[in-house]
Image: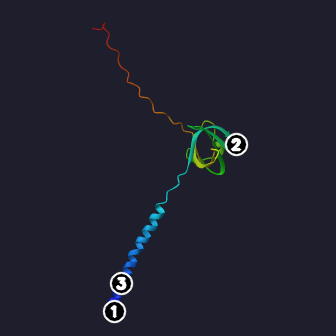
Amino acid sequence: MKSITKLSLVLLTAMAFAALPANAQSDSTSTNAAPRMRARGFAGTITAVDATGMTLTLKGRAADTTVKVTSDTKITKDREPAVFADAKEGLRVNGAGTKQDDGSWIATTLRISTKVRRAPAAATPAPTAPPPSSDQK
């Protein structure tokens, strides 16, 4: 009788330990399975700066966009910390934030770039030598 009790106790303990990793694994996969929210963003060239309202007007590919900058907006210029006053007309900007119903943005991040993107140079054909003239012998 004692051997049956010991055997039962060992089997129950083994089953309990076998169930623990399965539960831990299912918990970790459920947190990893949740989709990540990707920050929505804006990009364009600054066409107007309103220092009083702390807004920028951007010319983008499709249409002009208004971006509201707040005191919580993290601003960088060429990957260095910056301030709103660093935003000047003609500079490229991009960032992330919350898009409003009217199509404007409230920026959480604003990245200002002073570096000009260059278009790839067109391949120029190598100069060719003129054909020899019939005068030369």
Give amino acid for label 1.
Answer: Lys
Specify few, some or many for label 3: CA neighbours under 10 Å numbering under 14, 14-19, or 20 or more: few
Q: Residue at x 51, y 36 (%)?
A: 117
Residue furthest left in the image: 137
Q: Pointer 1: what residue?
A: 2
Instruction: Identify the coloring.
Output: rainbow
Task: Kindly tell me whether residue 92 is visible in this rendering.
Answer: no
* Tags 2 and 3 touching, CB below 8 Å: no
Q: CA distance from mark 2 to mark 1?
A: 86 Å
Look at the numbered disc 3 and give the secondary structure of its residue: helix
Coordinates of residue 80 in the picture (x, y in percent): 57, 47
Q: Quadrant of residue 65?
A: top right
Q: Quadrant of residue 17?
A: bottom left
Q: Pointer 2: what residue?
A: 51
Residue 69 higher or lower than 123, as above or below: below
Give amino acid for label 2.
Answer: Ala
Q: Which of the two labelled residues, at mark 2 and mark 1, occupies the earlier sequence position?
A: 1
Tell me, for residue 16, which label it has, or none.
Answer: none
Q: CA distance from mark 3 to mark 1?
A: 12 Å
Q: Which of the two labelled residues, at mark 3 and mark 1, occupies the earlier sequence position?
A: 1
Which quarter of the figure is the N terminus placed in? Answer: bottom left
Which quarter of the figure is the C terminus placed in? Answer: top left
Coordinates of residue 23 in the picture (x, y in percent): 43, 71
Q: Pointer 3: what residue?
A: 10
Give amino acid for label 3.
Answer: Val
Look at the numbered disc 1 and give the secondary structure of its residue: helix
Residue furthest top in the image: 135
* Tags 2 and 1 touching, CB below 8 Å: no
Q: Residue at x 32, y 10 (%)?
A: 133
